[in-house]
Image (cartoon, rainbow, N blue to C red):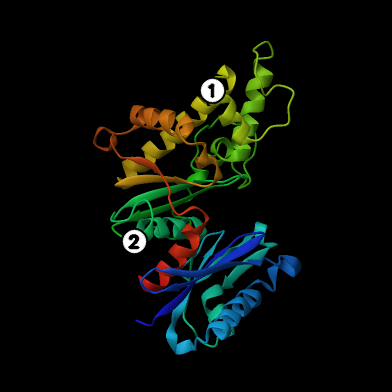
Amino acid sequence: MKEYAFGIDLGGTTAKVGLFTTSGKLLEKWEVSTDTSNNGAHILENLAAAVQQKMQEKGLSADKVEGVGLGVPGPVLDSSIVPIVCANLGGWGNRNVSIELSELLGGIRVLVGNDANVAALGEIWMGAAQGCRSAVMVTLGTGVGVGGGVIVNGKVIDGAHGAGGEIGHITVNPHETAVCGCGKRGCLEQYSSATGVVRCMKKLLDANPDTACTLRGKDFEAKDVFDAARAGDALAAREVDEMASTLGMALANIAATTDPEMFMIGGGVARAGEVLFNPLVRHYKEYAFQSCKETPIKAASLGNDAGIYGAVRLIVGA
């Protein structure tokens, strides 16, 4: 195997890029703005330029680079094709990313994965689930998203349509009237993302107008809800408990399907700490199949770097 590899985690605002050794040591990381203009027409050429500039700067010829791994915010088929238009990339998608980026890089091998699956791969390689063969990662975003990555026996479960691990779109409330960003109703994402926590907290405040709450009348974020619950606010604690119950039920259903060695919770919301994890573990055990009740639920450890680690793992583990 060659000595170096690049990992890229493509987001709607920026792409995180890392230069690694193929043994998994992160040598340098930086960010590139994501140009979503003209339906994202310039995204791949900008990523190629970022890699080529770093190779030039470090004196790396193509014969020293094993490949480039890329995590993207959408389904991926056959480690190469993004089959749908990705709204947060300006309408970019419907393309064979592996071939296009490889051609821009002069033939360097490129493999592509869904960003949440890739983050899970990073955590199982160098993070919280190191040493596990099977693990599930749930990313609770600071925005509207809940991502997921499922790894069974060392392999990412991406599925027939590239939609394996779309945990955020498990239906948890068939009676929900609000529409999820995916077009369905009652998705986990509507309750467990940062935006979902705020939405549900506002509904709780409206439904309990006579109950005192430190958040009432304020413009608040998900972090404020968790902080209020931690400080003893009863209504905020109720929202956190309901959110943890919903998420715990979803994890229990996943456990009954994949039976992982560990669940990892990542993303901005996961930084809430024990005020989230304690009720989450309790509710998970209430819902879980007997054999899976003691499956640990831990915070992911690589933070925002999980995606670039996992993108490199696509290349060196392939």
Q: Amino acid at mark 2?
A: Lys
Residue in view at x 57 percent, y 79 percent: 54
Q: Secondary structure at mark 1?
A: helix
- Determine the residue located farthest toward the top in the rendered image: 210
Q: Quadrant of the N terminus?
A: bottom left
Q: Secondary structure at mark 2?
A: strand
Given residues 230 and 285, the one toward you in this image is 230
Per the rendering, the mark at residue 93 is none
Residue in view at x 40 percent, y 67 percent: 313
Residue 209, compared with residue 26, is above or below; it is above
Horizontal side of 316 relative to 87 (left or right) equals left
Q: Is residue 11 visible?
A: yes
Position of residue 172 measured from the top left corner of the image (x, y, whole percent): 49, 34
Q: Quadrant of the C terminus?
A: bottom left
Given residues 292 and 222, the one toward you in this image is 222
Q: Amino acid at mark 1?
A: Ala
Q: Around disc 2, counting alpha carbons within 10 Å, would you say few (fewer than 14), some (14 to 19), or many (20 or more)?
A: few
Question: How many numbered callouts?
Answer: 2
Where is mark 2, residue-wise? 155
Q: Is residue 78 visible?
A: no
Q: CA distance from mark 1 to mark 2?
A: 38 Å
Position of residue 194 measured from the top left corner of the image (x, y, whole percent): 60, 39
Position of residue 132 measured from the top left corner of the image (x, y, whole percent): 29, 54
Q: Around disc 1, counting alpha carbons within 10 Å, would you say few (fewer than 14), some (14 to 19), or many (20 or more)?
A: many
Where is mark 1, residue-wise? 237
Residue 214, compared with residue 177, is above or below; it is above
Horizontal side of 151 relative to 274 (left or right) equals left
Residue in view at x 53 percent, y 83 percent: 58
Q: Earlier in the sequence, mark 1 or mark 2?
A: 2
